[in-house]
Image (tube, rainbow, N blue to C red):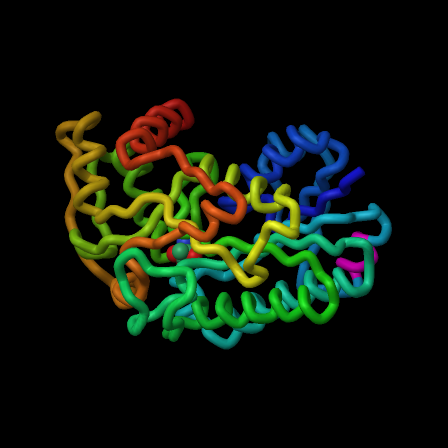
Amino acid sequence: MEKILVIGCSGQIGSELTLALRKLYGNDNVFATDIKQAPADILESGPFHILDVLDYNNLLHFVVRYNITQVYNLAAVLSGNAEKIPQQAWEINMKALMNTLELGRDSDAKKLFWPSSIAVFGPTTPRHNTPQMTVMEPNTVYGISKLAGERWGEYYHKRYGVDFRSLRYPGLISHKTEAGGGTTDYAVEIYFEAIKNKSYECFLSEDTALPMMFMDDAIHATIKLMQTDGEKLSLRSSYNVGGMSFTPKEVAASIKKHIPDFEISYNPDFRQAIADSWPASIDDSVARKDWGLNDTFNLDSMTEVMLREIKKKL
Ligand code: AKB
C-alpha cells in the first residue's frame, strides 16, 4: 500500500495534484502538508499537517511515523521572486530538495517526484524546439538551482538507489490556485483580469513566446511518470515537457473570441530578461517515447475552460 506525502499542497500544483492523488490512492493514504493552511477541499478530503520541508528532523519523523513510501516535493521559490532574494532562494530550493533526497536514504520514502523547469535552459540554448540534451547555461538563480537539482537527483539515484523522477515543467496555467512569483504567471493573471476587468497590463512584451501547459495535462503527466515502470525511464535527471507555445498577443486574441472588448497593454519589467533567456518551444519526444507523455489542451481549448471556471469562481 503506497503512503504518499505531498509537500506544498497549498500551492498552484499541490492544490490540484493532492486531490488527483487522493482519487487514485485513497483519501487517507495521501498526506497533504505545507507551511500554510490548505484549501478547504484538501482539508475536508483527507489528512493535512503543517510541515516545513527545511526542518529535516521533523520531516524524517513525519515520514517514519506515517510509513510514507512516496514524496511529491513541490516547495520552491519561483524565478521572479528568486531574483529578488538570490541567496535565500538558492538555500530554500536546494535544501528542500536535499532533505527529500536524504529521506530516500534514511527511510522507506524512496520514490521522489521533484519539479524541474524550462528555466534550466539559458540564452545559449537553442530557443526553438529545444532538445532534451543540449547546451544548459541558465542565468537565473532559479534556473541554476533547478539544473543543480536535476544533477543531484540523478546522483542520488545512481549512488543510493533513490527512485528520483522529474519533469521540466513549462509555465503552468490553472484556475484553481494562482501561481506566485514566476515569469510565466502572466498567462494565469491575464484570464483572471479578463473576467474581473476586461483588461490586463502584461509584464512581458507582446511577442514573447514561451512553452506553457494547462494544469490538467501537467497533473496527468506527473502521475503517469510516477506510475511508469522504472526500467522504462532512460533519464533520471528530468524530462522535457513541451505543452503548447504562445505569446501574450496570442492569448489576448484567444480571450477576445469570448470577450470581444478585452484589452491588453504591455509594460515589460525585469521578468522580460528572464523570459528572453528561456526556450520558446520544447522538444519532448523523449518523454513521449519513454513513458507516453500525451497532452491534450491547445490554447483555445484551454482558454474556454479557464474563462468558464474563473467566471464560476468569481
Ligand atoms: C516560473 O515562471 O518561474 C515557473 C517556471 C517556468 O518554472 N512557472
Which residue is drawn at the image coordinates 67% and 59% (left, top)? 53
Residue 58, image x, y percentages: 78, 60
Give the magenta-colored segment's residue range.
58-63
Q: Is residue 35 visible?
A: no
Q: Quadrant where the N terminus lies?
A: top right
Q: Is residue 262 visible?
A: yes
Which residue is drawn at the image coordinates 30% and 73% (left, top)? 124
Which residue is drawn at the image coordinates 21% and 60% (left, top)? 268
Question: What secondary structure predominates along the stretch shown in magenta?
Answer: helix
Q: Quadrant where the C terminus lies?
A: top left
Question: Where, by quadrant of the figure, is residue 226 drawn?
Answer: top right
Q: Which corner quadrant of the figure contains ligand 1?
A: bottom left
Residue 287, image x, y percentages: 47, 49
In this image, 52 relative to 274: left or right? Answer: right
Question: Where, by quadrant of the figure, is residue 224 drawn?
Answer: top right
Q: Is residue 290 positioned above or below 24 on the image?
A: below
In this image, 123 relative to 104: left or right? Answer: left
Residue 205, image x, y percentages: 18, 56
Q: Residue furthest toward the right?
A: 65
User: Looking at the image, which is closer to me, 270 or 216?
Assistant: 216
Q: Is residue 61 positioned above or below 137 on the image?
A: above
Question: Where, by quadrant of the figure, is residue 105 drawn?
Answer: bottom right
Residue 10, image x, y percentages: 57, 44
Which residue is drawn at the image coordinates 17% and 37% (left, top)? 253
Q: Is residue 290 positioned above or below 163 on the image?
A: above
